[in-house]
Image (cartoon, grey):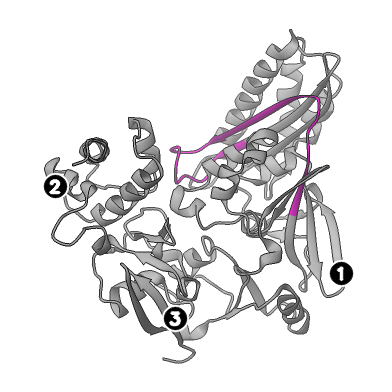
Amino acid sequence: MRGFLPDHQLRQAASLADALELLAREPGVWTPLAGGTDLMVLFNAGRLKATHLLDISALADLRGIQEQPEGLSLGALTTYTELRETPAVHRHFPNLVKSARATGALAIQNRGTLGGNIANASPAADTPPSLLAYGAELELASCRGLRRVAYDAFHLGYKQLDLAQDELLVRIRVPRPSGRTFHFFRKVGTRQAQAIAKVCVAAFGRIEAGVLAEFRVGLGAVAPQPVRARRVEQVLLGARLGALPIAEAREALAADMSPIDDIRASAHYRSVVAANVLGQMLLELNKMHE
Amino acid sequence: MPESIQLTLTVNGRERTVLAHPLARLLDVIREQLELAGTKEGCGEGECGACAVLLDGRVVNSCLVPASQAQGADLVTVEGLARPGALSPVQAAFLEHNAAQCGFCTPGMLVSATDLLNRCPNPRDGEVRAGLAGNLCRCTGYVKIVDAVLSAAAAVEAGQ
């Protein structure tokens, strides 16, 4: 049954300073709300625990995609539609466009935000694997100042974040790839739109003199939080294209995952499919050796 | 109503003011306060698209929009698609192609199809399917719906 409106209050943050001051003064009381595509679902189901909601959707500091020499700075309020419609994202970060396209459908993409996708902390969210692959960094603001944290150190466990009660995620930075690059994104769900991932794999590689000089793989829906496939990366870093150790990489993947059985897929299915997707990706990568 | 706010927005071209709790679902404001019952509630979790409306020109699921975020917005519901005395091209094409079965998804389909043709006046079959991917028809009458949208696009192009 739907939540009871009088149990909840929604307050508009007038400015970033106002929002941070409130989060510091009443720690743990306020839950930020942006596009509402996760929190309103909980409210409609009568499962929204947060009674005090802070509407941050009008904060200009959290908006906009800025192109900088070292990469892109994406405001936490960047919607999936903005990711899809921004040429600089297409040019340098195609996996982010694919992640945005894979999230819900248009009506969700018009409202849902990148910051919300991160802070909602679903292990099956579609942008985290791409952000992990691109080596993203988060900017967290509080009255105490600005803190930067590597995105691959931000998720500490199931729905647990390296985010203090007085901190707000304000921007996401992704370093601009250079040289010869490889981008891969594959989400496996029940259908192409409106599905929650059973398995999600994103990767970014930089190729130098025929070998993988840089390589990161992000995984979704196969662990309590979005994770990097660090053992797979170790196996492949420095490997020569055309002769990638695919079998060894597939074997290493098992230690990077801890999939569970749930209504969407069994742990066995997730393990097999993740390894198959990795294998398919490496076959594609191998073809870049000419 | 405790904590209610005065909400002023443009609804189908006309300015309206209602009182609403800031967290009230835009869907409920539309159906109960604005008394426009064309917009339907299907799943209430952003999956089915029966509650789709255009908010500042973008299609959204009104069941997931807190009322306060519609403050000052330009809202178009299914009731706002027809021109005075004439169905919109998408509505006329749905009628002609029998694209409604039980009809429950139809308001959302019409809104999403209108949004699609605003952005993409000459869509291909795949673009129509992508544009309507967030609208579920449990009668599964998708073929006639897609045909109707393609024919509406052709009719607009032909200047009808």
Check residue A188 for magenta coloring: yes
Q: Nearer the viewer, mark 3 or mark 1?
A: 1
Can residue B135 be seen here? The reply is yes
The range drawn in magenta is: A172-200
Q: Nearer the viewer, residue B132 or A151?
A: B132
User: Residue under mark 3: which chain is it in?
Assistant: A
Name the residue type under label 2.
Leu
Number of other residues with Cα within 10 Å of mark 2, as a class: few under 14, some 14 to 19, many 20 or more:
few
Q: Nearer the viewer, residue B147 or A99?
A: B147
x 26%, y 53%: residue:
B105
Name the residue type under label 3.
Phe
Say left or right for A63 vs B41.
right
Q: Nearer the viewer, mark 3 or mark 2?
A: 2
Say left or right for A217 vs A211.
left
Q: Where B29 sits versus A130, above or below?
A: below
**Cα separation between marks 2 and 1:** 59 Å
- Which residue has dot 1 on it? A145
Check residue A4 in the rendering and tell me which mark sits there, or answer none. Answer: 3
x 86%, y 14%: residue:
A209
Q: Position of residue A189 (x, y in %)?
A: 49, 38
Q: In the rendered image, which quarter is residue A79 located in?
A: bottom right
Question: Do the residues under discs 3 and 2 have CB atoms within 8 angstroms?
Answer: no
Can residue B132 be seen here? The reply is no
